[in-house]
Every structure is written in C-alpha cells, then in structure tokens.
Image (tube, rainbow, N blue to C red):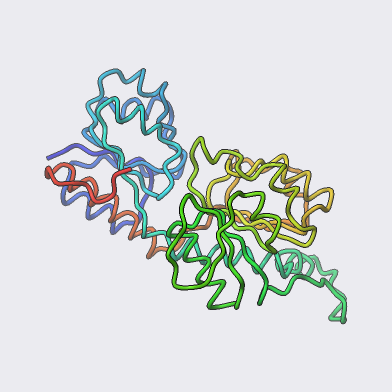
Amino acid sequence: MSRVLIGRNLPESVLAEARKIFDVTYRDSPYPLSHAEMVEALTEYDGALVTLGDAFNAEVFAEAGVPRARILANFGVGYNHIDVEVAKRAGLTVTNTPGAVTDATSDIAMTLMLMSCRRAAEGERLVRSGKWEGWHPVQMLGTHMTGKRVGILGMGRIGQAIARRCHFGFEMEVSYVSRSEKSLDFPATRCETPEALAAEVDILVVSVPASPATHHMVNADVLAEMKPTAHLVNIARGDIVDEAALIAALEEGRIAGAGLDVYEHEPDVPEALRALDSVVLLPHLGTATLEVREDMGRMAVENLRAFFAGEDVPNPV
C-alpha cells in the first residue's frame, strides 16, 4: 500500500476515501507545510496531496535530493506554488483539479462584480456602523451592471463560465483576451492585448492561470487604459495584478473600484488596500463550499489512485 501524505485539513469524506486506498499520514492543519515538512513529503512518502501555499520550489527539491515521492496531487486548479519543471526533472508527476472549481469560482466572480458595482460592502459597513440615516434618492449611487460590457482576461473554463453568466444573466456584452479565438455559444469580441481589452470594458475580470508569463499582467499600463467608471475583479491569483499599481489607481480615483478574492502576498493584505472603501475584499472564497471542496478532494485522490495503479492520471499538469 502506497504511503501518502495529506498535507492539509480536508473534508472527512475525502479523508475516508483516501484511507481506503493508501497508508495515509494526515496533517490536520489549515496552515501550509513548512520547508522541512515539504522536504519530508518528498523523502518519506510515495506521494503527497498538497495545496495552495505549499511552496514546492527548487530549494525544496534540491534539499530532498533524489526523492522517494513520485507524485504531487494538487488540491486546486492553480499550481503556481509548485515548480512543475523542477518537479518533473526530479521524476514526479504533478496533477491538479480542474473542472470541479469552475462554477463556484465563477459565482464568486459575479458576487464581487455586483458588490463592487453596487457598493454593497461599503453599504453593509455603513449599516453596521449605526450611521445610516435612511434612504434618499442620491445615496450611494453605484454602477448598473445589466447591459454593460465585461472584459474577460483569460477565456478558459472559468472565464467562459463567467462570461456566460454575464451574457445570459445580465445581458452584458462580452470582450475577452485569450491565446486563441474561442468557439463560444454566445457573442463575444476578442481583443489582441490586455490594454485594448481594458480600454473598452466597464468591468475587467482576471481569470488567467498564474505563471511567469502572467505575473503582473494587469500592471500600471493596463490600469491606465481603464475608464474612470470601470471596476477590476480578480478571482485568479493575486500576483497577476500589480497590487501597488492597483492601490495607486484606486487612491487617485483613476478607476471606480475593485473586487478581490486573491492577493499578491496572500494572506497579507496591505493596509492601503484595506483602508479603501472602493474595494471589496474577500478571504479567497472562490471554491469555499463543502460540495466543491469534496469534489476537489475526490479528484485529487483519484489522481493518486490512478497513478499508483499504473493508469494515466486524469489531470496532469
């Protein structure tokens, strides 16, 4: 029976399924693996189920030497915390959990869009403060989302799910940036660059995977092209947006607002960002429903099962 480390606390149903198949060591903690624990994961186990924050970088692999582990099954679709090329050179397979997260993450994107455009978080704080003086005709006027143009930066599974919600649910026009033209079941206009996309939309939604190529893809130049009435929403990874440039744009009123579920140096959120009323801040809730986390866990366990059974893994990266 293969020896597997589960490096973070998971739903009980996922843990029970894993224990039927593997000799499981369960680390019941919400916190990322330490450097020493990651080295141990590579040297003392046949495989490990890991997730966001578990930084399997070149230094970890170098210290591990020739690893015993042969697979890292990532719990999540994003895997920028794993140096995949180094892992593969060390002989490891890396997998992830696409598909399971699509609808939940898309729903959070819509939540942030509505909250940012309609100033919902600001309004909720006003009511809780006890300072709300009652309704009046020009109180807290926001942006009407229906019929506006949304820009999707990254038209993969999640980007398409967001765009579909916007088009069919809110009658929004859709523009996007993607490496290739997409065949879609709704009308959409492809733009050549993030700057061109930013210039024409009312809401810019970031949904590209994190990679060296997408680091700070939304930078000062992209933000400068946005309309002063536009909103930025990020449900992808924090370092795709240059956080300092975003703070400057918001503080100077060059864009109307932002809705963020992820941060560049998560879980650290700059005080300057927290101080802005024009920003909605969520604690990385993208996939935070029990059903979705169970689906993700089962997918990660299936990647492990298939690997150790000598089958093709369903979700290699």
Q: For this view, does 284 lie left or right of residue 301?
A: right
The spot of residue 220 in percent (x, y) is 72, 42
Callout count: 0
Q: Nearer the viewer, residue 270 or 231?
A: 231
The spot of residue 10 in percent (x, y) is 36, 51
Q: Nearer the viewer, residue 126 or 138?
A: 138
The spot of residue 55 in percent (x, y) is 44, 33
Q: For this view, does 11 lie left or right of residue 133?
A: left
Q: For this view, does 169 lie left or right of residue 96?
A: right
Q: Nearer the viewer, residue 300 or 234?
A: 234
Q: For this view, does 246 lie left or right of residue 80?
A: right
For the point 36% across and 59% down, the residue is 99
For the point 36% across and 54% down, the residue is 98
Which quadrant of the view contains residue 32?
A: top left
Quadrant of image for the N terminus: top left
Q: Nearer the viewer, residue 41 or 99?
A: 99
The spot of residue 208 in percent (x, y) is 51, 50
For the point 66% across and 62% down, the residue is 203
Quadrant of image for the C terminus: top left
Would you place residue 193 above or below residue 293 in this image?
above
Would you place residue 160 above or below residue 186 in this image?
above
Would you place residue 152 above or below residue 312 in this image?
below
